[in-house]
Image (cartoon, rainbow, N blue to C red):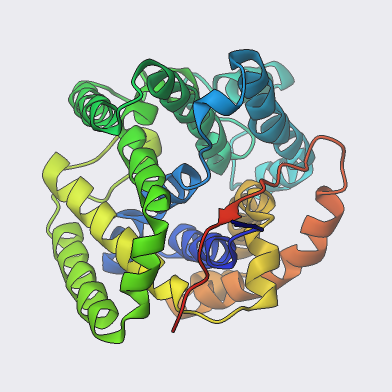
Amino acid sequence: MNKKRIIWLDQARAIGMFVVMIGHALAAGKSKKYIYSFHMPLFFILSGMTFKNSDEKSVKDYIIDKIKKLLVPYFILNLLMIIVYLVNVEIGVRSSLTVEQLIIGTLYSSNPPYPMIVTTTWFILCLFIIEMLFYIIKRIFKDDRLVFIAAILSGVIGYVNSLTITNKTLPPWHLTTALAGLVFYFLGYIFMKNVDSITQFVGDNKKFILATIMLGIIGHWFAMNNARQISMNQEKYGSILYFYIAAICTSLAFIFVVMRIPFVKLFTFVGQNTIVYLGTHSPIIAMFKKLFPFFAENNTNAIMLCVLLYFALIPVSMLIMKIPGMRWKKKIVQPVALQN
């Protein structure tokens, strides 16, 4: 096998992150509802694609590896963004909290009793929990059919729990959100195990077009007909059937399209540094929309802000990724290159 980073996976992260930014910038409406139906599930799927067999590392080494790649960057990013938080407090975007409250909120990470400094970094700690859960499940069950059953049960438990949960009872580190997200992580893992055949499938123009259109239509219909806008970090899913169908179908359609996109150096760079984008974009968007009302006038202007910020964060990412503890790139194996 040719051991190198999978280009389309990096580009999927990069384009997916731009979609996330747009979702956070848009005003409430149909477009925002559609983006929220799949943008976080997509990243759980992409994360599952990088899972390595649990036998390759000891339990201790695996935990230490994830602490370095996820927990350390989480705290670094929240600390770095304290300046933007203070600005947002001054202009009325964020409520003022004491140092103690900020520490508690960042350690708890699930909003109650206090929000973390950068609310979008909830995903990092939730992903940490998912990767721990999946690692344990894979060590217990060697048969992927049993892993599949465990993932489905996890998703059902996570959904049932969401029916009784409130903003005041969210557990720390989004533990129960992780139960729902494990389904997507497993899908990413299975996708990568079958990437050879999927690559050949996507390389066939007729199959690619038909599958992408069908998945896109199905995903959009279930997303728009769900009873509510999805919010995974608040455990608000609407219908469990509609939630999972919309998220999986749209995410797969998105991935298929990205697999056919030629190499773009910008996307590859951003894809390797999405954690910086994740940990910085939201408070900056909120700040600029408040300071410059032009960007808040309509969705077109909001998207324009996202484009400008997307490029502006390139040098910022270069600087932040030089900070000790921020380097968390993964070496990913590419079995077969996509044949057009």
Residue 298 seen: no
- Image point (34%, 63%), residue name: 197
Left or right: where does residue 305 sit relative to residue 317? Answer: left
Residue 240 seen: yes
User: x and y percent of residue 48 in the render?
Assistant: 45, 43
User: x and y percent of residue 6 in the render?
Assistant: 58, 61
The one of 8 and 85 positioned closer to us in this rendering:
8
Q: Quadrant of the N terminus?
A: bottom right
User: x and y percent of residue 270 in the render?
Assistant: 66, 63
Left or right: where does residue 275 sit relative to residue 242? Answer: right
Q: Is residue 225 above or below residue 74?
A: below
**Total of numbered circles in the picture?**
0
User: x and y percent of residue 64 in the render?
Assistant: 69, 21
Query: Quadrant location of residue 34?
Result: bottom left
Query: Quadrant location of residue 259?
Result: bottom left
- Image point (59%, 41%), residue name: 94
Q: Is residue 329 above or below residue 61?
A: below
- Image point (45%, 78%), residue name: 260
Q: Quadrant of the C terminus?
A: bottom left
The one of 152 and 201 positioned closer to us in this rendering:
201
Q: Is residue 229 above or below residue 263?
A: above
